[in-house]
Amino acid sequence: MKIKSGYFFTIAVLAFVFSSFNHISVFKSGIWLAKLKTTSGTVIPFNFELKDSAGKKSINIINGKERFKVNDVRVVGDSVLIKMPLFDSEIRAQLKGNTLEGNWVRHLGTKNVLVPFSAQADVSYRFFSFPQQAKFNISGRWSAPFTDQDGQNKDVTVGEFKQNGTDVTGTFLTTTGDYRFLQGTVSGDELYLSCFDGSHAFLFTGKISNEKTIVNGKFYAGASSVSLWSATKDENAKLPDAYSLTVLKPGYKKIDFSFPDLDKKQVSLADPQFKNKVVILQILGSWCPNCMDETAYLSNDFYKKYHAKGVAVLGLAYERTTDFAASKKNLDQLKTRFNIPYDILVTGYTSNRAEAAKSLPALSGIVGFPTTIIIDKKGDVRKIHTGFSGPGTGDHYTEFTHEFETLIDQLLAEK
């Protein structure tokens, strides 16, 4: 039988097409291991789970028991865009088989910072597929001072860890908040902890000398920051009183301001809606993960319990830019994410603490974000709380909310 040459050409084309289909990159559902590369070459790993429901993709970023959901996941050809619901950052990457390569892009108001990003499908471990047997168990509370690389600017910090075999979760608490949900491994005598939440990328490493000592600690944050730390087991370790760090200047009893809400309507504490109310004034930024944790608490459990009793909550936002439209866009996302029932005002000042302090001259300064000002029914400032110990701190979060609500009950009972 005679076969024409065109037949072979057609078969060749079809073979090539089917072969190409077999090599099409697919953003696979399941667990991925992602890595961010700092300027020093250090890798900060984290895991995420990709889900696909009726063609709609979403991911959950995994940090300990937290699952940070991201719904804005777009795939066009071999390009992937993962836009964070908060913090004004995104991951832009290209699919290559079962891998992703690209950048984590942070929009910082005046500039963009790019951190190299990669990810591998079907990898559920974080640091090691087979870590060495742990030589020590670091569960418990630790005194863990942090310094910059020349040993200056010591920061009082408390570590809280839970270890099961080689798996470790926990956090570090500081005077301005906590490092949220950390997850990692003890391999032999080496400690590794990391987290990523769309705003912060953290890696903590250290050598465990014995059950009570961790040395040679390094803390990598974002694209380039590196700090040093060590730790000593101390079940009595604690931070300075968070109500003592930010105070009113001598001669002041009240806070005064007027800023626009998201509809550009001016709002101040002199407005009738705050008369005879206990007011919670929340100093925050949409870029701040600890502010996110506080917002989740104030918007839901706290607001539902106390709003009808005569408590008002008001947010003062200090964004990375003084551009109202850009600030509003990020704050609208924050309001939607947490279904915030109270007003957030755009201060027009940046997240720089010295710059932010100019907007509230009655304060001695703003030590950190968030800062929470508690005002009584007469309009007098009664307490100022610096930082927020979120749910990643376990018992500390429970203790704070109990103490905070006890104070609010006392202020409501006053005539």
Image (cartoon, helix red, strand yellow):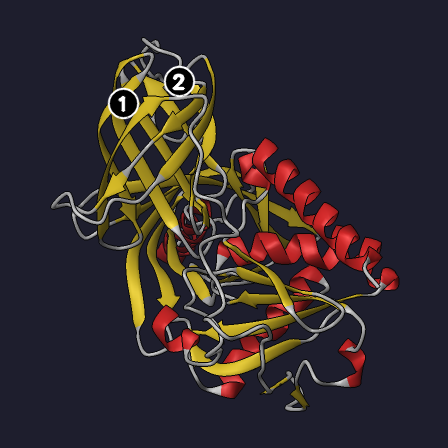
- Could you say where residue 211 lies in the image, as x and y percent from the top left? 33, 12
Furthest residue toward left: 150
Q: What residue is pinned by disc 1?
A: 214
CB atoms at circles 1 and 2 under 8 Å apart? yes
Badge 1 amino acid: Ile
Q: Nearer the viewer, residue 388 or 366?
A: 366
Query: Residue visible at 65% across and 70% down?
Result: 380
Badge 2 amino acid: Ile
Determine which quarter of the picture holds residue 276.
bottom right
> Element under label 2?
loop
Quarter of the picture containing the N terminus is top left
354 with respect to 348 (left or right): left
Q: What residue is pinned by disc 2?
A: 138
Give the answer, above or below, for where 260 lies relative to 123: below
- Could you say where residue 112 lies in the image, as x and y percent from the top left? 32, 71
Furthest residue toward right: 308
- Could you say where residue 317 lies in the image, as x and y percent from the top left? 54, 73
81 with respect to 402 (left or right): left
| Badge 1 density bin: few <14, some 14–19, many ≥20, Cα 10 Å | many
Quarter of the picture containing the C terminus is bottom right
Give how far apart the Cα atoms at labels 1 and 2 are. Answer: 9 Å
> Element under label 1?
strand
185 with respect to 381 (left or right): left
Query: Residue visible at 33% across and 48% down?
Result: 118
- Could you say where residue 278 lies in the image, as x and y percent from the top left? 75, 65
Give the answer, above or below, for where 249 lies relative to 51: below
Can the viewer see residue 47? yes
User: Total label count?
Assistant: 2
Q: Which tag, 1 or 2, sits closer to the chain's start?
A: 2
Q: Nearer the viewer, residue 247 or 123?
A: 247
Can the viewer see residue 55? no
